[in-house]
Each structure stands twice: as structure tokens, then as C-alpha cells.
Image (cartoon, rainbow, N blue to C red):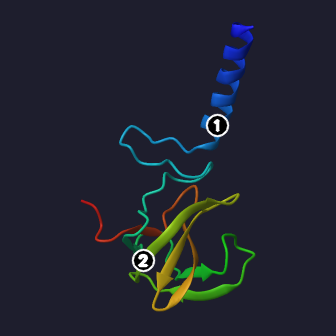
Amino acid sequence: MRRLLLILIVIIALLLVQQITPPNAQGVRTGCSGTLPTRLIVRERARVSPIGDDSPLNVRAAPGTDNEVLGRIPIGGVFFVLDGFECTQRYTWYQVEYEGITGWAAEGDAEVYFTEVYPPLP
């Protein structure tokens, strides 16, 4: 009976651990499956990266490219990270605030970061 209870506890623990995003070796959350490791920090500033994609960053009503675009942040634009992260099939999303617009912006995808910590880390 004890063995069965122990096995049940281990199975429940494993299921719970799979739902939590584990930290990597540096203590940083890894992010969403199929995307680059997350770098943004909640309650800190970030900016739209001048490297990679040369488009302004869309701020949307909710995570996901099918949601309404509330505004755009230009390349180099500095914004505040309010909450996150949320995962969709292709992107890691953070809730952000930029010049009075609050919404969700993608940090990056599997190949490129659209954003970076501000000021940039050395």
C-alpha cells in the first residue's frame, strides 16, 4: 500500500513539474517550446531590437497574431514589461506598456529576438 502511494505521489509530482517552465543553468526561465530562450524581465524596461527583424513591434489586445493590433513600437522604442510570459504556437508573448498603450508583444520566435533587455546586457 505504501509503495502504491509513493508511486502515485511521484507521478503527480512529475505531472506538476512538466507544467512549470524550468530555469536553465543560469537561473533564467527558458520560455516557450519552439522559441528562443526568454530574456525579458517582468517589471523592467526593454526595447525593440535593432538587430534582426526591421519592422516595428506590434502591440496586440491579447497574445496571438490573430488578435487586434492596438499600436506599434518603433525600432529602438523603449517599453515597460508588465507581465508574461504566455506561449502561442510560434511566439513568446509579454504584456507591455508603451506610451499609454497596454497590450501584448512577441519577444521573438524560433530564430530571432524582436526585443531585448534595456539597457542591453554586455
Which of the image's four quarters has the C terminus?
A: bottom left
Which residue shows up at 51% across the image and 72% down it? Answer: 53
Which of the image's four quarters has the N terminus?
A: top right
Query: In the rendering, which numbered label is found on residue 6?
Result: none
Q: Nearer the viewer, residue 23 or 17?
A: 17
Q: Which residue is mark 2?
A: 80
Q: Give the label, 2 or 1, closer to the camera.
A: 1
Can residue 108 be seen in the rendering of this structure? no
* Position in image of residue 85 (x %, y %): 55, 61
* Position in image of residue 112 (x %, y %): 51, 61
Left or right of 86? Residue 30 is left
Q: Amino acid at mark 1?
A: Leu
Q: Quadrant of the rendered structure where residue 78 is?
A: bottom left
Which residue shows up at 55% across the image and 84% down it? Answer: 102
* The furthest residue to the front: 1
Residue density around tag 2, few if under 14, some if 14–19, many if 20 or more, within 10 Å: many
Q: Which residue is mark 1?
A: 16
Residue density around tag 1, few if under 14, some if 14–19, many if 20 or more, within 10 Å: few
Which residue shows up at 28% across the image and 61% down it? Answer: 121
Left or right of 1? Residue 40 is left
